[in-house]
Image: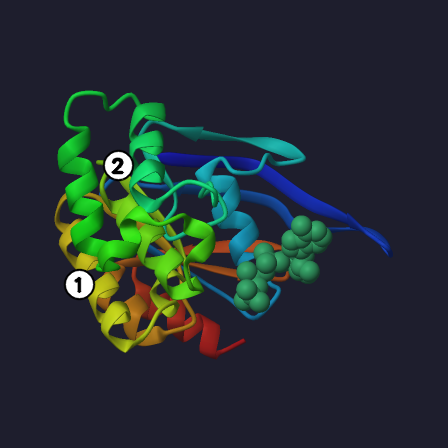
Amino acid sequence: MIELKNVYKRYKNHHGSDWVLKDININIPSNTSVGLIGRNGAGKSTLLSLIAGMDEPDKGEIKRDCKISWPIGLSGGLQVSMTGRQNVKFVARIHGFNKNIDDIVESVKDFAEIGEAFDDPVKTYSSGMKARLAFGLSLAFDFDVYISDEATAVGDRNFRQKAISAFKKRVNNSSLIIVSHSEGILKELCNAGILVHDGQALWFDSIDKALCAYHDL
Ligand SMILES: Nc1ncnc2c1ncn2[C@@H]1O[C@H](COP(=O)(O)OP(=O)(O)OP(=O)(O)O)[C@@H](O)[C@H]1O
């Protein structure tokens, strides 16, 4: 269960500061895959990063009783002077996986399919190669909830298909909380939805109902 209680978030900008999210109260049950829906700039990514614990609310609290991933495919955390392999080992050690590091390295290598570049410094990678490595890295660890902000929109067609099928496999054992502008992907992967609109976040226990409410805005 992830519980958001009276959550407020704002960013300071040149106009001063505006509340992006105002008094959000939502309970996300365990084993429920959720799609975050809303117009551009509504606050979906903001809500997702609060849920993931990447950012803190200005007011209110978020309780989590499960292991939540960092956003899948986020390549910003890769150390560019290190190779793909070294990055994987580094992240595995940070997460306390000291025993089966070789298995983790192999699973990321298989997923990323970047060939010998796996042993080259990440600064020599294309953005697609970085995305493949970062995606494989996120999936190599067992989390209860996987977070994704448009991770299925990166890479070429083959990679997108691979990413979606990897997510589908995960849905059997874990749950997902995802932002995607693709209704097809949301319907395929999620059972519930959160509509973010006008500073509010509305919970729907079915993704179809959430999408209907979004179309009616
Ligand atoms: N780091 C930041 N500093 C200042 N303003 C920000 C920051 N991040 C987001 N915002 C603002 O907060 C609002 C919500 O942004 P957010 O990225 O959460 O929306 P979104 O629904 O994910 O949008 P999109 O569908 O376009 O990706 C926007 O007005 C955006 O300009």
Measured from the top left, where is residue 211 in percent x and y? 39, 71
Residue ID at (52%, 49%): 47
Report the amino acid beneath label 1. Ser
Q: Is residue 155 above or below residue 133?
A: below
Identify the residue shown where x is 31% and y is 67%: 186
| Distance from Cα at disc 2 to Cα at disc 1 | 17 Å
On the image, the x and y values in percent for residue 109 come to 20, 49
What SS does tag 1 mark? helix
Location of residue 198 (image quadrant): bottom right
Residue 143, which numbered label? 2
- Across and down, in percent, residue 178 comes to 37, 56
In the rendered view, does 12 fall on the left or right side of 125? Answer: right
Question: What residue type is disc 2 on?
Answer: Phe
Q: Earlier in the sequence, mark 2 or mark 1?
A: 2
- Circle 1 is placed at which residue position? 165
Can the viewer see residue 171?
no
Q: Quadrant of the N terminus?
A: top left
